[in-house]
Amino acid sequence: MCGIVGYIGPRNTLGILLNGLSTLEYRGYDSAGVSFIQDGRLELIKKKGYVKELREAVAQAGFTLDDRHTNRISAGIGHTRWATHGAPSDENSHPHMSMNGKLCVVHNGIIENYAELRRFLKKKGYVFASETDTEVAAQLIEYYYGLNDNKDINAAVRRALKDIVGSYALCVLCVDEPDRLICAKKDNPIVLGIGKGENFIASDVTAMIEYTKDVVFLEDNWILTMTKDSVEITDVYGDPVEYKVEAVVWDADSVQKGGYAHFMMKEMHEEPKIFEATVEPRIKDGDIYLEHFPVDEEYMKGIHNINIIACGTAFHAGCVGKYLIEKLCRIPVVCTVASEFIYSDPIIDEHTLTLVISQSGETLDTRNAMKKAKELGSGTLAIVNVIGSTIAREADNVLYTAAGPEISVASTKAYVAQLGCLYLIALKFAHVLGKLDKEKYEYYQNELLQIPDKLEQILRKQTDIQRFASTHFNVESTFFIGRGLDYFLSMETSLKLKEISYIHSEAYAGGELKHGTIALIEDGTLVVCPITQDDLVSKMESNIKEVATRGATVLAIVPERFRDIKFSCDVRFTIPDCDELMAPILGVLPCQIFAYYMAVYKGCDVDKPRNLAKSVTVE
Ligand code: F6R
């Protein structure tokens, strides 16, 4: 969702801000803006639309983005907005300038009591130029700044925060203090990047890794004051807090397309490498190590049930996790969509382990669900991709997926890495519980270690899928049908197709078709059937026959060992053989490639699908 960048230092500030905003585009947004102090003047340029249009507006206003020009800007902030309060428009875009032009504010999050604060400020004579909750913060800070004898912007921000109810990552630029930036955080991520004679802030590290790898993930209720040479972090009372500088392991290339047409294609091609990086270091001498997560027999015997919470793609990974853990460990597992979990009355106590799955580590629904599970006494283990993210920090333990930055809104490589962690967890738990003997335990580890090569083999055949998509991209409706693990695979790939190609798509359990949905199958409907489980072959062939006789075109995705089996499909795509338990990891890749090409042939903006945001920080 919204993105923030801020910079103080000798480089061309506008160049840093606009490049940073371009990097944050993947989070999803509908307008963008910058504010900066040049020669003591507070400037503001903002627009509905993309960063490209903002760049043009900046150039038209006569400002240079060229790094070779001397930087006359003492500090600057930038923002990409994903509309919540007020439609996308120039006025509602951030930054918001206070009425008397003293300061500009960018904000991620929601000010819940904004209507009340707006009424208060109106009584004090403040006039509003937008419909946003953020403008209220700008006016309120200015109001307290005016009352404050010492004219200290940090004190004014801290005072205003006492009145604000809601969530925020807030950054403030004040014309009277042209060399300082003030940031505040509650329930929304903001990262400080520490350079030499320069400092950065951004919603995530991708916007700054080109310049610095030394970062501080701000905690809730911290206030940061930075100049180009100094960093001061306090709590809301102004007392210094202890903070840790961490080194980012991601490199700058990981946020570039690297020759691929889209990030999504690049990220699918990274799947072999990131699966290996997630799994291989955790397998040593025939055993699995889950870093700092203590798993011994005594601990496992104390776990009576497992609860999995996640959203979207991460939820689909969780469904596979449920299947694996129940099958291998014989522990009951409930996997719930995080946004529904908070309204449920789950059976959870101190004998429950909650697995929380999130690529971004910031999804608000997932965070809320994790909070509820903790309140009920459950221990938490988070499977997270973004290092230092909120879920990673708030969970009792974390297992990082080594997917690197995922820029495409549609999650692909992070899903595969999440599966990698879930297989490791299920195998380790099962072995510790004595449900998986050493021989089988090592056999499965070996199967996992062979996955990267097999993913490579699939990528080498991607043109087969491309060819199929090139002749079917204008279908109106697609159904993904699978049974057992293939049903979860169908759920995930159906989501992928609909989110990037806007083609109506549904996933159905093969056995459910005849209970209603088959009424929708007609001439020209496209049906994709992953069939990877040996004992489900004949059942799935019956499903294919049922839809084919009603006019559907069927693409089947099957392992090599089914080569001699006749299916009534129109086209089949073959994936390498593996133990059938591991098949979801291989089966998903051709389906992701299929969704990708369907979207490309339809002319869709693959990496930035309409209405979607990468990091969903609202409920
Ligand atoms: C789909 C997709 C979303 C996310 C969901 C959860 O491609 O990316 O469905 O999986 O919004 O996000 P995270 O994993 O960041 O919690």
Image (cartoon, rainbow, N blue to C red):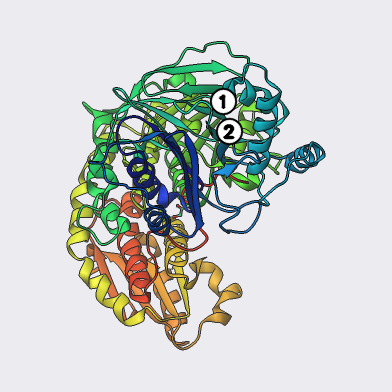
For the residues bearing labels 1 and 2, Cβ distance under 8 angstroms: yes
**Residue carrying label 2:** 187
Where is residue 574 drawn, in percent x and y?
Answer: 24, 66
The local crowd at label 1, few if under 14, some if 14 to 19, many if 20 or more residues have their Cα within 10 Å, is some
Picture layout, residue 467 above or below residue 118: below
The amino acid type of the residue labelled 1 equals Asp
Pick the front one: 573 or 59? 59
Q: Which mark is residue 99?
A: none
User: Secondary structure beneath disc 2?
Assistant: loop
Pick the front one: 486 or 355? 355
**Residue carrying label 1:** 220
Pick the front one: 595 or 247? 247
Q: Which residue is rendered at x = 56% and y = 34% of the image?
A: 170
Q: Which residue is rendered at x = 47% and y = 73% of the image?
A: 503
Pick the front one: 18 or 426? 18
Q: Which residue is rendered at x = 45% and y = 64% of the image?
A: 494
Where is residue 288 drawn, in percent x and y?
Answer: 30, 29
Where is residue 308 drawn, in percent x and y?
Answer: 53, 40
User: Secondary structure beneath disc 1?
Assistant: loop
**For this view, does 155 lie left or right of residue 482?**
right
- Dividing the picture into quadrants, the one containing residue 236 is top right
